[in-house]
Amino acid sequence: MLFNKDDVLVALRRHIGEGNGATAAELVAEMTGSIGTDTVAERLLRAHVTSLREEGHHICAHPARGYFIAETDAELQATCEYLYDRAMTSLKQVAAMKRVSLPDLRGQLHLPT
């Protein structure tokens, strides 16, 4: 294995705040010592980031600023909004393809008004 999620967390602790963000390629290079594009390693990094987030770590990311650990509540909130918007975009696409309303997508209970 190239690196594990603990390695990712250690690397990210050197990137606190959005001004210190690092791209996936930069983080992979920090952890492996190799420079260049390694799509397998970058996918592994993203999988570990997801796992760490699911454990409650405040790992933020932005396409223009890279990955970083939130330094402020505002940075964490911005990342949460970004993730929420991405999720809603995907759910809207699924609802449209199935030709159902978003609330009906997962069978939400409709109560009479």
Image: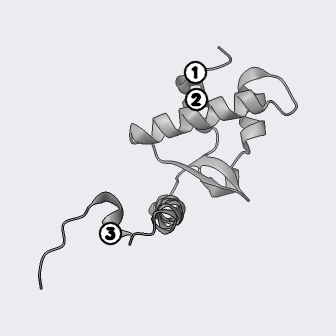
Distance between the alpha carbons at the discs numbered 3 and 1 = 38 Å
Whether 1 is drawn above or below 111: the answer is above
Q: Nearer the viewer, residue 77 or 16?
A: 77
User: How far across and how far down the image is residue 11, in percent?
Assistant: 63, 32
Q: How is the image coloured?
A: one colour
Instruction: Identify the residue under disc 2.
Output: 10
Total tally of numbered discs in the picture:
3
The residue positioned 71% from the left and 25% from the top of the image is 31
Residue kind at label 3, given as amino acid type: Pro
The residue positioned 74% from the left and 45% from the top of the image is 23
Q: Nearer the viewer, residue 106 or 51?
A: 106
Residue kind at label 1, given as amino acid type: Asn
| Horizontal side, residue 86 vs residue 30: left or right | left
Q: Which one is earlier in the sequence, the residue at label 2 or at label 3? A: 2
**Label 2: few (<14), some (14–19) or many (≥20) C-alpha neighbours in 10 Å:** few
Residue kind at label 2, given as amino acid type: Val
Q: Quadrant of the C terminus?
A: bottom left
Instruction: Identify the residue under disc 3.
Output: 103
